[in-house]
Amino acid sequence: SNGSYGMAQNLESNDVGIIILGDFESIREGDKVKRTGKIMEVPVGEALIGRVVNPLGQPIDGLGEIVTDKARPVEAMAPGVMQRKSVNEPMQTGLKAIDALVPIGRGQRELVIGDRKTGKTSIAIDTIINQKGQDMICIYVAIGQKDSTVRTQVETLKKYGAMDYTIVVNAGASQPAPLLYIAPYAGTAMGEEFMYNGKHVLI
């Protein structure tokens, strides 16, 4: 009844477990809870390109409302193995050492792991910048980072013209844990919209 939204996670016979998406401090015992009749979904489409949004697809860059009539569920089934094409086209990161020693293909997942301050984020940002002119939509999902850090990364992407084909999803360290939880799902849902329309996507 206070306007907060949540996503049902556990359905028991006597209770429902819900993660609250947004302000939870004003929720009180006895508040009314109503079903929306919809599953959790985020806005998708071309209108998000060049924008910085939160995991709910709401703009947080001060550039006005995002107008789109498309949405996708955050927990859609992934395509089965038999539906996927084999990886046969390279995706250049722009870093010669990686492209020579650990080549990455379009359609492939790649784990980038390392200690703090070893350049993991720099690799991701450089890879996005290198996709300019490659017919690739990029989605950068920042989870648990400081807002100032994400702002710097967005400025870097703008400097090199990468925001022309990039969506930034920011689930900052100051945001509630449920938003951090759904951030990768939201970024994937946004990417799948382009994938199902025949475009290449880097998340």
Image: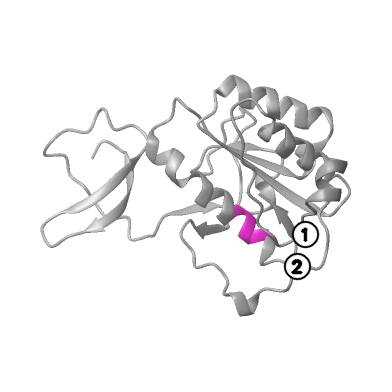
- Alpha carbon of mark 2 to alpha carbon of mark 1: how far? 6 Å
Q: Which residue is mark 2?
A: 87
**Magenta region, main secondary structure:** helix
- Magenta residues span 190-194
Q: Residues within 10 Å of mark 2 (few under 14, many from 20)?
A: few
**Amino acid type indicated by mark 1:** Gly
**Residue at disc 2, secondary structure:** loop
Quadrant, the N terminus: top left
Q: Is residue 181 found inside the magenta-colored segment of the image?
A: no
Q: Is residue 44 visible?
A: no
Give the image location of residue 124, x and y in percent.
71, 39
Give the image location of residue 144, x and y in percent.
50, 31
**Amino acid type indicated by mark 2:** Val
Q: Is residue 68 visible?
A: yes
**Residue at the image point whose x is 71% and y is 62% from the top:** 107
Q: Nearer the viewer, residue 117 or 52?
A: 117
Q: Residues within 10 Å of mark 1 (few under 14, many from 20)?
A: some
Give the image location of residue 99, x and y in percent.
84, 48
Determine whether 17 is above or below 155 in the image. below
**Residue at the image point whose x is 58% and y is 71% from the top:** 79
Horizontal placement of 58 versus 24: left or right?
Answer: right
> Label 1 near label 2: C-beta < 8 Å?
yes
Q: Which residue is mark 1?
A: 105
